[in-house]
Every structure is written in C-alpha cells, then in structure tokens.
Image (tube, rainbow, N blue to C red):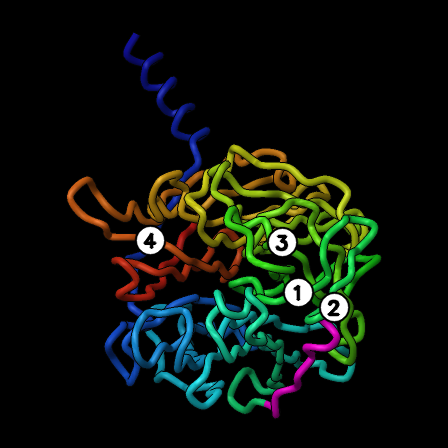
Amino acid sequence: MVQYIICFWIVIMLWLPTVAQTASVPVFTSGSQGYKSYRIPAIVKAPNGDLLAFAEGRADGSDDFGNIDIVFKRSHNQGKTWGPLIVLVDYNNLQAGNPAPVVDLLDPNFPKGRIFLFYNTGNRTESEVRKGNGLREVWYKTSTDGGHVWSTPLNITLQVHRPNQPAINPAYNFKEDWRSYANTPGHGLQFNLPPYKGRMYIAANHSAGNPDSHSEDYAAHGFYSDDHGASFKISAVVPMPGSNESTAAELSNGALLLNCRNQKGDIKARIIALSKNGGELWDTVFFDHRLPDPVCEGSILNVGVQNRRNILAFCNAADTVNRNKLTLRISYDEGLSWSGTYLVDEGHDAASSDYTAYSDVVKIESHKIGVIYEKADYSTIVFTRITWK
C-alpha cells in the first residue's frame, strides 16, 4: 500500500508545473538618483545578451504628468546586478514616458541588430488632453551598439496618431478625433515567421472625442512598420470601447494576439483581440475570464514553439480588487488555455497595501523568464528570474 502511495505522489509531482524563482533585486528605487518616483517598467534583451531595463523617472513625485524622463539600466549577468542609471530622454520640464523597446534582429542593413525605443511626450495632463487641450506625441530613437549610443529621436506622430480629425471610421463607427495617446506599456514585438517576418508592432491606445464618464472614449490599437522603421501604419481600432493599455504577441500563420486592459472596470478581466493579418484588422474580440485583472497593465511575450504553436507567457496583477497577486502564466496553445500558473509576488495582505502593479517580461534563455515589476506600493521596481517547465 505504501508503495502505491509513493508512486501516486511521484506521478502528481511530475505532472504539476514546477518553478524556481530567485530573490528579487532592486533596479529603480524611488527617492534615489534624482527622482522621487519610478514607474512603468519595460525590458528587453540586447543582441549581446545584456538586459536593458527602462522606466519613467518622475522628478517631482508619482503623478503621471510633470517633469518625467526616460531612464534605463543595464545588466551583464541576467539581472543579478544592475549598472548605473542613464537618462535616455529628457523632455525639459515636460513628460516623456511609456518606453516601448523592440530589438530588430532581421534588418539586413544591421546584421548585429538594432534596438528601437518608442516613447511618448505630452504637454498637458491626460485629463486635459482628453478634453482637447493638449497633445501627446510619438517618437523613437535607435541604438546599433546594444544601447551604449543612441540616435537623434524621430517624431512619427503624424504617421501613428490621428489628432484633431473629427471624422468617423465607417468600419468601426469610432471617432478619429484622437486625443490622449500611449504606447503599450512594456516591450514591443517583432514578427519572426512569414508572412510578416520582420514586422515591428507596437501595441497602443488612445482616447477619441470628448471624455466619457465610463471611459468609453478609450480604445486600443497598434502601429507597425514593415521596413525597419522607415515608415509606419496604424491598425484598425479594437472595437471594444474602454479597451486601453495593451500588449501584443505573435501567433502562428501570421496571426497576432492583442491583450488589453479594460479601463471601464465593469468586467475585471483582460480584453483579447485576435487578428489574422499581423495586427492590421481585428477578427475576434472578447473578455478572457481566465485572466482576471483589477484594471491594470499586463505584459505578454513569445517564449518558444511547441507543435508548431507559439508558447506565450503573460504576467499581470491577477486580482479583481487590488493591484496584487502578480502572476506569470504559460500557454502552449496560443492563449486558448493557460496551463502553467506561477505566483511571482503576493503583494499585500489584509493589513497593508503593498501593491504589485505594472510589470514586463523578457526571455532570458530556454525556460527562464525575467520579470521586472513595481513593488511595495510603487516605492521600487525590482527584477526576478523564474525558471518554468
């Protein structure tokens, strides 16, 4: 009988997903190095294997608008230690934020790879921009040496934004008078398989027309480049009012999955939009109730291939009340199900408000994912490594 019990538990242990997690390492600590707050992390792996972690350095406090710079740090050892803070974008006393890095490894003109950093600038608060009293713009800069030297920034606002165009898109019946605008947050995407191999895709969101009390003026979209940043096009608007901060992953056969925050908050789950043509048009939109969300950001990443399907990793605050229970999930069937679930950080308990909020993920190597995330009520941004099976 004892032998049967032992065999039973061996089978159970082999079946259950396993995870090994390192202790979290502080990357950006609020109140240090000239900034009272750090928010909105993003991360990518450079062509030489270094990890580059980006964030908003908020000089005067935690507000979303003000004197905000984009800063970054580098790790040579898979996130065990981090180098000095570098200011990458300083928009004087105004706002520069929403860093969305992408590593282009498929441009024949840059065989060693080129890093793109897309970001936004703003001259008024989001509430004022939603009223039509300000402007959010879209820029990018690049690096061909792994992030040591960066190019002069290029303004691509007129290619990827539709400000002050009071028209109606007949296909989706959405206003084209775009006002508020934001990339991602988190990393962008490059397609690795035909027919869109090489396409860079940045998930984004905007508001259109006058503010709506239920946040229905918000909607998600994306923009993309098929010529390595020489030109850009805008995707169709996701036909779900209230869809907001988004993250994208490549699926098989040229499909794309867009995973969005529901700004309305009436349904505490992620919005999923599926595209058969690389994120240009949307074929299906629905709420995925297997991905609970408290109205916060999430991050999705391609981490491998199995049975000709892309393996996806998704990370978010998997709670329907507070920004807590930061959870990493793995899907072997391109989001149809999530069979691996790993708690990254519990966050708060009943006696505290120790929030774990925005996060981003990076593939370090096979079955090893790095997670960078806001911890302890936005007082620090930390990094941890998770080994999954």
Does label 1 or label 3 sit earlier along the sequence? 1
Question: In which quarter of the view is residue 40 placed?
Answer: bottom left
Q: Quadrant of the N terminus?
A: top left
Left/right placement of residue 97 relative to residue 254 reads left
Determine which residue is flagged by label 4: 356
Element carrying mark 2: loop
Q: Nearer the viewer, residue 90 or 242?
A: 242
Q: Earlier in the sequence, mark 3 or mark 2?
A: 2
Q: CA distance from mark 1 to mark 3?
A: 10 Å
Eye-nearest disc, 4 or 1: 1
Q: Would you say 17 lies left or right of 233 here?
A: left
Specify which label sits upstream in the sequence, 4 or 1: 1
- For residue 165, the mark is 2
Point out residue 3 in the picture as x, y percentages from the top left corner.
Answer: 32, 14
Identify residue for label 1: 178
The three-letter amino acid code for the residue at tag 4 is Thr
Query: Would residue 212 be found to the left or right of residue 371 on screen?
Result: right
State the image coordinates of residue 305 (x, y, percent, origin top left): 65, 48
Q: Quadrant of residue 378?
A: bottom left
CA–CA distance between discs 2 and 4? Answer: 38 Å
Distance from disc 4 to disc 3, alpha carbons, whole Å, reads: 25 Å
